Image (cartoon, rainbow, N blue to C red):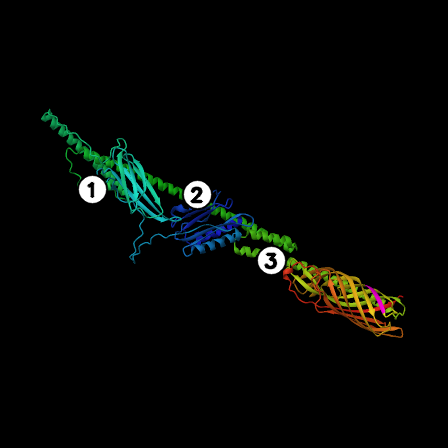
């Protein structure tokens, strides 16, 4: 509701204050029910169009609708109304209008307004659209254009074709315009100045004399009947009153009345005739005086109304003094017509006054509601401003106390209370500031822990390397000529092999990576030789290899590898210098890896690039080579190049094993150097974000320095 009020203020400001758009549409909206009230028209005189939109919204189920677009501006142009819903399910709408926009442009603008109100794009639908045509242009003193004329009633016309009864008259008015589409309204009024009720049928015909409307009406003496016909086009070209009868007798009004001439042979005396003549003359003068008084009253009414009247012109203007002594019927008829016309004008004047009073009352009520609404909006704005300032202050207090999560919550709340883009941007900047402070604090703690861990790992490696080195110094070896011999092996080394890692920071992009895991290693094993005094001998060599992530800032982890190899040597004699061999082995390798780029940079960066990886798999290796073997004074020296194929347990049966080269040298039974190298080694570990990986070849190498000690 608060977001809606902000949207409402923006629209009202644009329409009522800036007044840069046309006012061809009024829109009322109920956020609770989603009802939308629409009214269109070039003008909005007396807020009539606004009232129609408000009533339309209520009729569609709206509760307490608010004006989205209203005001006194006028104009033509296209419009569009779009409705939708927010992610939380609340109703929202957008309105666009203006004389320079097409319907398509209005629809797009209305959608942008709805999305601005947090409506989701896939929920939008066009509620209504259209264009309001302009009124005909007003005549300018500098051009020859036809002036705009407000539709007016025609003059009163005789109702009957033969003009046999001038006391029945009609007039008409034609309205042409646009609402949601082009419409024509034809209004008719029929007045009856007879002393009898009449009924009639009023037919409306097109240019081909086809009847489109033919309703029957009844008009009482001294009254006026009004009716209207509405159509979508200007196709009515003529009208035809028919079947005009007196309702009491059913006789046509144009039938000649039969009068009886009574000739009384026994006429009164001459004195009686003279007396009657004098009485008739007096009565005629009274009727003429009454008519003159009625004409004077009629004239005053016409002046006040500002409109001419054909009855007044017919009966009260020109030479009206030529009456004979026998014109009683004529005068009575004219007096009746005048009284009827005066009565009608009095009723019209009374109705017009009531209409004006009602319009003024409605306008006053509408203005009062608008003023109350503006006052309510002003108070709501003040309340939201207080809430905004309070949320910002609480966020600042939390930030100063290093309660970053609370600060971010308060700044986010302040953004909801923002009433304009400046306040929204200010709250967002505050939120970003707290967010960066939180990241910085967590980064400092994380880097400090990693640096402390690096120191500990370096010390542990130094101690373990010293112990293994001391152990190696105590070992002595010599060649055994017995059929069986056992030796103990210890050594140090350096190894590099590839693994997968994945992003482990909530502040960094989620990616998976291929890492070159390089680390110092330790080695121990037992070497058992069988048939050493024969040309065919066999060696079984259980091994344990371990790696520690020392000497590398920002990197932690390690691995353990254990298993055994079995080697078969073939030569002509036991002391032959050249031997060939075949070797196979099986090992289990598992470990973990972590990398912190900021710790690796000494805490001088702010990348929040933290990666972690784990791996666990088995390796089967097999291969062979040859050995140049010398024995002198109980000491052996040999060089042993070899090629091995290695296949990890996560390979499928269709995956080819990788090629690994090995070269081992034993110098006078004192020390052994072992070198391994592969140009395209397999990569182990779990992948969390496979779509971010780029395949590439990874190398493998290993260097070992081994010392043997003869046990048997």
Q: Residue furthest left?
A: 270
Disc 1 and disc 2 in contact, CB within 8 angstroms: no
Tell me the number on the disc at residue 432.
3
Q: Please say whether residue 605 is visible from this viewpoint.
A: yes
Q: Earlier in the sequence, mark 1 or mark 2?
A: 2
Instruction: Give x and y (percent) for residue 137.
Output: 33, 54
- Tell me the quadrant of the picture where the C terminus can be found: bottom right
Q: Residue furthest top?
A: 266
Tell me the number on the disc at residue 55.
2
Instruction: Give x and y (percent) for residue 58.
Output: 46, 42
Q: Is residue 249 above or below residue 411?
A: above
Q: CA distance from mark 2 to mark 3?
A: 46 Å
Q: Which residue is mark 1?
A: 317
Instruction: Give x and y (percent) for residue 693.
Output: 64, 62
Q: Which residues are magenta?
A: 536-542
Q: CA distance from mark 1 to mark 2?
A: 49 Å
Q: Please say whether residue 118 is visible from this viewpoint.
A: no
From the viewer's perspective, tell me whether residue 353 is left or right of residue 104: left
Q: Secondary structure at mark 3?
A: helix
Q: Could you say which is closer to the camera, residue 415 or residue 517?
A: 517
Q: Secondary structure at mark 2?
A: helix
- The answer to which image quadrant residue 610 occupies is bottom right
From the viewer's perspective, tell me whether residue 57 is left or right of residue 291: right
- The answer to which image quadrant residue 580 occupies is bottom right
Question: Is residue 238 shown in magenta?
Answer: no
Instruction: Give x and y (percent) for residue 635.
Output: 87, 73
Q: Could you say which is closer to the camera, residue 514 or residue 612?
A: 514
From the viewer's perspective, tell me whether residue 54 is left or right of residue 648: left
Nearest to viewer (mark 2 / mark 3): 2
Nearest to viewer (mark 1 / mark 2): 2
Q: Could you say which is closer to the camera, residue 534 or residue 450?
A: 534
At 59% from the left edge and 56% from the top edge, which residue is drawn?
430
């Amino acid at each position: 509701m608060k977001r809606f009020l902000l949207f409402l203020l923006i629209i009202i400001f644009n329409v009522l204050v800036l007044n840069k758009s046309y006012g061809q549409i009024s829109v009322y909206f109920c956020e609770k029910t989603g009802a939308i009230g629409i009214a269109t028209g070039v003008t909005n005189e007396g807020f009539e169009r606004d009232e129609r939109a408000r009533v339309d919204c209520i009729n569609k189920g709206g509760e307490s609708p608010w004006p989205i677009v209203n005001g006194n501006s006028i104009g033509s142009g296209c419009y569009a109304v779009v409705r939708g819903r927010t992610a939380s399910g609340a109703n929202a709408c957008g309105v666009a209008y203006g004389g320079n926009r097409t319907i398509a442009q209005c629809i797009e603008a209305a959608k942008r307004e709805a999305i601005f109100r947090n409506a989701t794009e896939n929920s939008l639908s066009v509620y209504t659209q259209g264009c309001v045509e302009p009124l005909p242009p007003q005549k300018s003193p500098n051009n020859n254009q036809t002036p705009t004329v407000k539709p007016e009633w025609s003059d009163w016309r005789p109702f009957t074709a033969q003009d046999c009864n001038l006391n029945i008259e009609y007039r008409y008015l034609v309205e042409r315009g646009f609402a949601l589409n082009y419409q024509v309204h034809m209004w008719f009024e029929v007045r009856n100045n007879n002393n009898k009720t009449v009924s009639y049928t009023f037919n409306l015909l097109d240019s081909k004399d086809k009847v489109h409307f033919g309703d029957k009406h009844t008009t009482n003496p001294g009254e006026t009947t009004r009716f209207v016909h509405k159509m979508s086009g200007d196709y009515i070209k003529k009208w035809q009153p028919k079947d005009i009868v007196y309702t009491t007798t059913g006789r046509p009004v144009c039938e000649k009345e039969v009068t009886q001439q009574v000739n009384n042979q026994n006429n009164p005396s001459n004195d009686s005739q003279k007396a009657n003549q004098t009485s008739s003359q007096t009565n005629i003068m009274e009727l003429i005086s009454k008519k003159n008084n009625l004409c004077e009253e009629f004239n005053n009414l016409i002046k006040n109304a500002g409109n001419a009247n054909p009855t007044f012109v017919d009966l009260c203007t020109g030479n009206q003094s030529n009456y004979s002594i026998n014109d009683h019927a004529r005068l009575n008829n004219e007096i009746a017509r005048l009284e009827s016309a005066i009565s009608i004008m009095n009723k019209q004047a009374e109705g017009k006054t009531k209409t004006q009073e009602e319009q003024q009352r409605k306008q006053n009520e509408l203005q009062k509601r608008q003023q109350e609404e503006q006052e309510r909006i002003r108070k709501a704005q003040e309340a939201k401003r207080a809430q905004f300032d309070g949320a910002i202050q609480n966020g600042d207090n939390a930030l100063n106390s290093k309660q970053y999560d609370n600060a971010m919550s308060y700044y986010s709340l302040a953004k909801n209370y923002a009433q304009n883009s400046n306040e929204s941007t200010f709250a967002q900047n505050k939120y970003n500031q707290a967010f960066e402070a939180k990241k910085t604090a967590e980064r400092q703690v994380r880097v400090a822990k990693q640096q402390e861990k690096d120191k500990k790992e370096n010390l542990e490696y130094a101690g373990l390397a010293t112990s293994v080195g001391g152990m190696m110094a105590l070992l002595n070896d010599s060649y055994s000529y017995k059929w069986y011999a056992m030796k103990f092996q210890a050594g140090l080394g350096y190894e590099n092999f590839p693994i997968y890692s994945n992003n482990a920071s909530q502040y960094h992009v989620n990616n998976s990576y291929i890492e070159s895991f390089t680390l110092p290693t330790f080695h121990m094993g037992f070497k058992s030789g069988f048939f050493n005094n024969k040309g065919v001998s066999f060696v079984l060599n259980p091994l344990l290899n371990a790696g520690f992530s020392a000497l590398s800032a920002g990197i932690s982890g390690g691995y353990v590898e254990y298993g055994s190899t079995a080697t078969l040597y073939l030569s002509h004699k036991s002391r032959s210098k050249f031997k060939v061999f075949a070797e196979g082995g099986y090992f289990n390798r598992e470990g973990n890896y972590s990398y912190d780029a900021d710790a690796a940079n000494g805490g001088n960066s702010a990348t929040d690039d933290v990666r972690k990886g784990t791996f666990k798999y088995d390796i089967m290796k097999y291969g062979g080579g040859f050995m140049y073997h010398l024995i002198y004074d109980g000491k052996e020296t040999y060089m042993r190049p070899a090629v091995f194929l290695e296949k990890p347990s996560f390979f499928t049966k269709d995956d080819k094993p990788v090629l690994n080269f090995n070269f081992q040298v034993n110098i006078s039974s004192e020390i052994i150097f072992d070198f391994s190298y592969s140009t395209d080694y397999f990569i182990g570990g779990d992948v969390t974000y496979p779509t971010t990986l780029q395949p590439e070849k990874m190398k493998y190498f290993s260097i070992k320095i081994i010392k043997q000690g003869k046990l048997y």
